[in-house]
Image: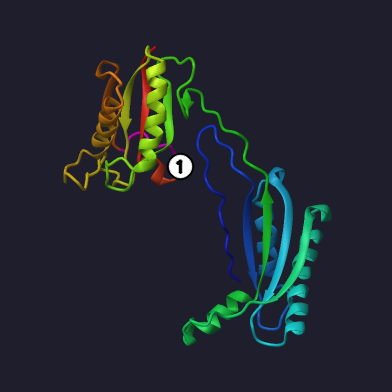
Amino acid sequence: MRSLLLLPLLFLFQISLAQEEVVQSVYFESGKATLDGKQADAVIDFIKKTDSTRIESIQIFGYTDDVGKAAYNTKLSTQRATAIKDKLLASGVKSKIIVSIEGKGKIMIEDDIEPEKIPEKRSKNRRVDVVLNLLPLPEIVIPGFYTGIQKSHKVGDHIYLEGLLFERGSSKLAFQAKTQLDKLSKLLLKYKNLEFEIQGHVCCTPPYQNEAIDLATKKRKLSTNRAESVYKYLIFKKIPKERMTFKGYGNTKPLGKEPEYDRRVELVITKV
């Protein structure tokens, strides 16, 4: 039995996501609708490992390969979906949260698939997808971290801009980053008392190497160059130099999220 688990998307500070779906696929032998012990245990384990307080509903969809007549495949796919439903109910899952049990029949093979890959493709189509619809994650608020300028700040507050991310090995500001900085600069001009350090960061360097190479300059100053790019852009937007400093921190301050979120620049308030 093979399974596919689509992990929920990660979330950032002060952001709650829309409803998520998590999917487990159970694969069947040709013409069969019965579960062996390992398959059954895997389905139950899949449910148990998910936070039960977030499961809003469960949908079960059965499929077959493209061999055989439509009526036969519809019946077989329904039997497969029902077998999964019965196993979930027997394990203690409440029937009221199982909102769909549907046999969708056969999945056709694409016309352009290579002949030698057809058997493997068919084996993946003989399956049931168990779909967990999850409630949004609770809002995460980390003290001192904000996604924009606030009416009042204290020294040490971090301003994290979700769009202020960089391509791997690059310190060049993308269009989305400039858009974020345009909005930020308007607020910085409004709150003229704020002074801050612009902190650059990187990801994905070896453990023994704190800093990364900027592909444009070929020098190991990527986090510093990222911070300086933001510094120069804010000067362009009329933010006085006297209010800003910039510094690269390499990979020493990871967010603990996916690596791409560490290709970032933050503002840290130094004076209010």
Tell me, yes or no, if residue 20 can be seen here. Answer: yes
- Whether 73 is drawn above or below 90: the answer is below
Compared across the picture, whether 89 is left or right of 191 comes to: right
From which residue to which does the magenta span run?
A: 251-257
On the image, which quarter does residue 255 sit in? top left
Tell me which residue sits at (64%, 83%) in the image.
66
On the image, which quarter does residue 191 sit in? top left
Q: Quadrant of the C terminus?
A: top left
**Which percent across, then down, holds residue 230?**
30, 32
Give the labeled residue for mark 1. Answer: 257
- Whether 252 is drawn above or below 218: the answer is above
| Closer-to-camera residue (30/242) | 242
Residue 99 is inside the magenta segment: no
**Which percent across, then down, holds residue 67?**
65, 86
Tell me which residue sits at (47%, 22%) in the image.
144
| Closer-to-camera residue (241/101) | 241
Tell me which residue sits at (51%, 33%) in the image.
13
Prevailing secondary structure of the magenta residues? loop
* Disc 1: CA contacts within 10 A as few (<14), some (14-19) or many (>=20): few
- Whether 194 is drawn above or below 253: the answer is above
- Whether 251 is drawn above or below 146: the answer is below
| Closer-to-camera residue (114/188) | 188
